[in-house]
Structures are given as structure tokens and as C-alpha cells.
Image: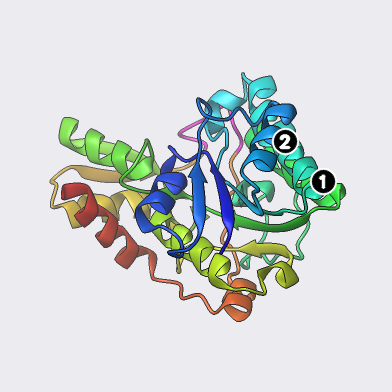
Amino acid sequence: MANILVTGAQGQLGSELQKIGFAFLDEVFYTDVDDLDITDQRAVEHFVRTHDIDTIINCAAYTAVERAEEEEEIAARINTEAVANLARVALAEDCLLIHVSTDYVFDGTATIPYTEKMKPAPQNVYGRTKWAGEEAILNSGCLYIIIRTSWLYSSFGNNFVKTILRLATEKQELRVVNDQIGTPTYAADLAEVIVRIMANEERVEYEGIYHYSDDGACSWFDFAQEIVRQSGLTCSVCPVTTAEYPTKAHRPAYSVLDKSKIIRTFGVTVPDWKEALARCLKENKE
């Protein structure tokens, strides 16, 4: 039995965790900013002590990559300072902190999937604030499991899949970047991984950084094209280069993650990204 605090519970991953649920005997407290402001360390301390929390699962994050370029202070408050608060409380109260991070901590210059041993070099505000959050955990001395993921989507919240579905019904043609390569990840699959980790009674012995995404690699163009194809929409998807579609935030050209460590350690299965997308689209219709 565990007393679990889930932060960011109204987001994509938090919502999927609520849907899946944990072990029958676990007591789980699903919170979002209205319930618990994790930028307030005293509030976090009070909550953890009051509810005798032994595991914190942090799903809260500032994920608006473009807007972060103009709102660095806000992004840092959520992605770095709040994470540091959670880490300090986790250390003081002897909790395990499971924290979700991102492929955007890498610079995108690799030509093979990124392993956990490869050095981060984030190229935008979002990536830098998420990496600073990781460093805050590493420097805190708390028990931790950091899971980096990529291109997260689900039937909850706002994400690339929902945006493409909406635009594909409004327009006859979409232009999508074809030279940024990564892996889409269905948030339900990542939630299953976290639940599996929680089911491992020896989880605290596997402290460290892990990578998880669904399997395979594609460009944003490939992803959009597959969304349209599987949805039976008639919108045409056209490939463009990053140079033809400039953005404020510099995005990694390649950010595929190597999942071998998490597979080896926790025995997780990694579904193909196209199969995962099909499950999400079916869920979205129901």
C-alpha cells in the first residue's frame, strides 16, 4: 500500500493516470493548481505531512514551447522552482519523487536515439527550464525516478493530435514540418508505465533517469499525415522545412529516445506509435 500524491492531475498524463488507477489498496490524492500550488513549498510540506505521502508523481509542467520564449519566468516557476520544492519536501519526508521530463533537454544533433547517459544541451526556454528542474532533483539528495518522454498526446487536453484533427476539418491543405524527427507518445501508455513502476515493491532501488516514448520514429509531417489517414479525413498534408516554418523556439532536429533501460529495468512493453495513435483516435471518438 502506498499514499500517492499526483500533481498536475488535470493535464494529459494526470488524466490518464486517473483513468487507469493504481493498486486497490493505494490511497491516491489527485491534485492540480487549485488544490495544491506546488510553487508554494510550505503548502507542499503541509499536504505531504497531513496525508502521510510516500510517493510524489509530478505530472505538472509548463509545456507551451512557443509561449515559454516570452514567459520564461512563468515557465521556470513551474518547471524548475516548483520541482525543486517537491524535491526538497521529498528529501525531508523520505518520499520517492517520480518526475516527468522531456526529450527537449537535448540539442537534437544526434543521429542515434538518445540514451540516459548522453549530455543534455537544451536549445529553448522550455527545454532549459525542464533540464534545470532535473538538476534540482539530482542536487537535492531525494529518492527519484525521472522519466523523459516525447511528443505527448492523448484524448485529454490540447495537443498535436487534436490540433491536426481540428485543422483538417477546417482546411483543405496543411503544411507541416518534415525535418524534425522524434516519437509520438500516447499519454495512456506512459501512464501504464508509471503504474507498473509503482507496482514494483523494489522501485526505490532503481533510482535514476529513464527514457520512455512509444516505438518508432517519424517527423511531425509523418505524424500529421498518419492522423489524417487514420481519421479518414480528406485534407492534404504537405511537407515543409523548419526554415519555411519559422518559430520563436528552436526545436531539436532529432530527439528519438532510447528505451532499452526502462524496458530492461521494469519490463515495460513499448507499442508502435501508429498502433498507439489508433487507440487514442478510437478513444477520442467514444
Residue extent of the magenta highlight? 243-250
Q: Is residue 142 above or below residue 67?
A: below
For residue 135, above or below residue 172: below
Q: Are marks 1 and 2 in contact (CB under 8 Å)?
A: yes
Q: Residues within 10 Å of mark 1 (few under 14, many from 20)?
A: few
Residue type indicated by callout 2? Glu
Nearest the camera: 253 or 192?
192
* Residue 57 shown left or right of residue 105 in the figure: left
Task: Classify residue 257 by image quadrant.
Answer: bottom right
Residue on which disc 2 sits: 45
Q: Position of residue 126 (x, y in %)?
A: 63, 35
Magenta stretch mostly in which secondary structure?
loop
The secondary element bearing badge 2 is classed as helix
| Residue 1 left/right relative to 42 | left
Residue 161 location (% of width, % of height): 32, 45
Magenta stretch: residue 202 in it? Answer: no
**Quarter of the image where one finds residue 266:** bottom right
Q: Is residue 192 visible?
A: yes
**Residue bearing the label numbered 1:** 92
Q: Residues within 10 Å of mark 2 (few under 14, many from 20)?
A: some
